[in-house]
Amino acid sequence: MSTRAAQFQATVRRREPLSDHLVRLVLDGLDGFTSTGVPDEWVGLVVPGQFQSRYYTVRDFTGGELTLDVVVHDVGLVTEWAMRDCVGDTVTITEAKSSFAPPAGATWLMLVGDLTAMPAMARIVETRPDLTTYVIAEVPDDLAGYLPEGPDVTWLSPPSHGQSALAEVVEGIEWPAGEGYFWMAGESAQMRAIRKHLMREVGLPTSHYDVMGYWRATAGRQPRAVDPGPLWRAGKAAGKSDEQIWAEYDAAREASDG
Ligand SMILES: Cc1cc2nc3c(=O)[nH]c(=O)nc-3n(C[C@H](O)[C@H](O)[C@H](O)COP(=O)(O)OP(=O)(O)OC[C@H]3O[C@@H](n4cnc5c(N)ncnc54)[C@H](O)[C@@H]3O)c2cc1C
């Protein structure tokens, strides 16, 4: 099985700041690109002058236009590009992949994430109004209007710049009764502890949660960042669960840092 992802050229048509740390980019071009239709789907993005990709959630793909909401933080390949006027730039996008897969019997959804998770959480809320949804969002900006109406939302501020307290927050969750699905994305260091907690204390089967490390707090750039695309395709081909693949991705990233 090929581990090369299909690639598409796209042009940035619009750039709209949504808050101090979130910028919306709308791209077109993308001949042959298709959406998976799964609300947490993501693509790889390679910006001009670079060869490494970074991963971004498809906030929307309608009428041939792809919307990505990009967190602008201190330093990084994409963040520095997205901070300036990038309208008219040509970028490369890789094929969409996805992870969100609630069990058929789920009646509730618990979504937890930081700013990087907001695009996926907004799209999940939008596409699953049939489920009773709780959102816990740890964000530095006022994004009250960003999520569609409907869910029970708890807004939290990060404890300090670049830090997250989501692991502790998850330990304090009062879980709804009945069958449901837990989806979480944010800084990777928190994720191992959370997976253990979900398995041991909460007793959720692995088919009932997805916990994803979307970025890794390190000093400086991440020149050896691990590409999740090949791991994802190889894992799927080997019949592994999403959870197993994400755990392997986190382990590979830790190894690549060492
Ligand atoms: C499946 C998936 C979906 C994702 N969806 C989105 C999305 O929709 N929107 C989005 O903005 N991000 C999303 N991310 C996260 C994004 O890919 C990373 O944040 C990425 O590292 C940003 O690339 P960069 O070039 O700006 O910084 P890099 O060059 O990768 O990193 C440079 C430095 O910045 C730090 N850093 C990286 N990201 C952050 C951050 N978010 N906050 C603070 N410091 C950071 C790193 O620790 C490093 O020190 C997603 C990741 C995955 C795996």
Image (cartoon, helix red, strand yellow):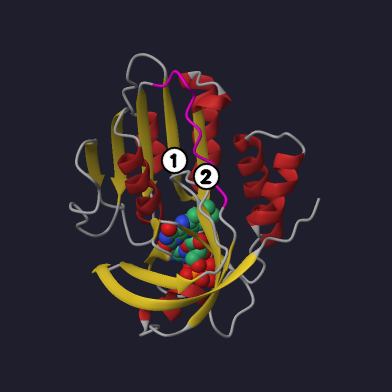
- For residue 67, above or below residue 52: above
Q: Disc 1 residue type?
A: Met
Secondary structure under badge 1? Answer: strand
Instruction: Judge left or right: residue 115 versus residue 147.
Output: right
Measuring 65% from the left and 33% from the top, which residue is drawn there?
241
Measuring 37% from the left and 14% from the top, which residue is drawn there?
178
Q: Residue 62 at what x, y percent from top left? A: 38, 58
Mark 2, other Cα within 10 Å: few <14 / some 14–19 / many ≥20: many
Instruction: Judge left or right: residue 75 versus residue 26.
Output: right
Residue at numbered disc 1: 184
Measuring 31% from the left and 28% from the top, which residue is drawn there?
130
Task: Say which of 42 and 34 sits in front.
Answer: 34
Residue at numbered disc 2: 212
> Residue 167 got which mark?
none
Mark 2 CB within 8 Å of ligand 1: yes
- The answer to whether mark 1 and mark 2 are in CB contact below 8 A is yes
Q: Residue 29 at what x, y percent from top left? A: 49, 73
**Residue 84's image quarter?**
bottom left
Distance Cα–Cα, label 1 vs label 2: 6 Å
Q: Residue 43 at what x, y percent from top left? A: 54, 59
Q: Please give the range of residues in magenta.
A: 97-106
Q: Residue 257 at what x, y percent from top left? A: 66, 61
Q: Disc 2 residue type?
A: Met
Instruction: Judge left or right: residue 177 versus residue 196.
Output: left
Task: Say which of 218 and 69 sits in front.
Answer: 69
- For residue 38, above or below residue 198: below
